Image (cartoon, grey):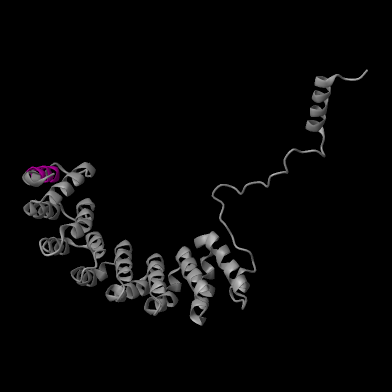
Amino acid sequence: MHANGPLRRVLVLAALLVSPHVSADPPKKPAPPRGAAVTVSPDVAKKLKSDDPAEVQSALDEVRIAGPAASHLATDIAAILDRGASRALTEAALETLGDLEAESAAPAVAHYGVHRDVKLRRLAMQTLGRLRGPVAVKALRARLHDADGMVRGTAASALGAMKAKEALPDLFIAFDHKVAEAAASIGQLCLPKDCDDFAGRLGRQPFEVMTGGFDQILFRPTGEVPEDVKVKVIGRIRELGTPEANKFLRDVQKRLKAASPRLKQAIEQAIAATAGGAS
């Protein structure tokens, strides 16, 4: 007896499901365990020393995927910068060293901070900000007076992110020479006297440029910036009495949830005092 149409289809489907040789989809490779470290192949170091640019680029790509886990290769990558390479490989090497976050590579990267190619100088500043350490700090401080505004700004921002308090004098000079990014870094790093010194520039510097620094000062822990300093900063902003000052204060009020009653009161009073010019 022959199976009818519907039954035949059922039997064929059943055979497919039980057959060890038939599969609708190819078997999937098991996924690596969650959180497993990415490693590089054993020949990566050899490829980094290759005379073939394609091999070097392939090795750099592999190292970037691994990230800090491959930081032991930083010396080999720094050697690419030291011996000179094509523009593409130089950029790739700088970016890779940033991903590795290996402080030991800072001397090789710092050399590109004075390169005649402004794009390489900018990239060097970005990389140094990720490498950290005294060599990186020294190189970044030196570029606060670079001819290119983006180099100056990147250097200023990096110094703040690195908590390089020793750079404060240079950041103040840079800020006075219109490096706007220095404002936030000063706000991140300033000691009470420095914070007051920064606030004293209000009126000589555009308010919108200074807000990045004020924001940092007001939101830092009181262990770093005492409440007296914060209240004094609020008072200086209040004296400005402009719509921009009122808008900034209202924004701070919305975000500063954990402020003490004294600081909250100072902000409320400053908002009320500047409300006449608010839009």
Q: Position of residue 231 (x, y in %)?
A: 11, 51
157 vs 256, left or right, is: right
Question: Can I make out residue 248 in this image?
Answer: yes
Q: Position of residue 95 (x, y in %)?
A: 47, 67
Q: Quadrant of residue 256?
A: top left
Q: Is residue 130 above or below residue 142?
A: above
Which stretch did the figure color magenta?
263-272
Please give the name of the residue rendered at 11% of the width and 65% of the height, measured from the top-left corner. 204
Name of the residue lying farthest toward the right: 1
Q: Is residue 276 magenta?
A: no
Q: Position of residue 190 (x, y in %)?
A: 21, 62
Q: Quadrant of residue 111?
A: bottom left
Q: Nearer the viewer, residue 252 or 10?
A: 10
Q: Is residue 265 above or below residue 68?
A: above
Q: Position of residue 265 (x, y in %)?
A: 11, 42
205 vs 180, left or right, is: left
Please give the name of the residue rendered at 38% of the width and 76% of the height, measured from the top-left corner. 113
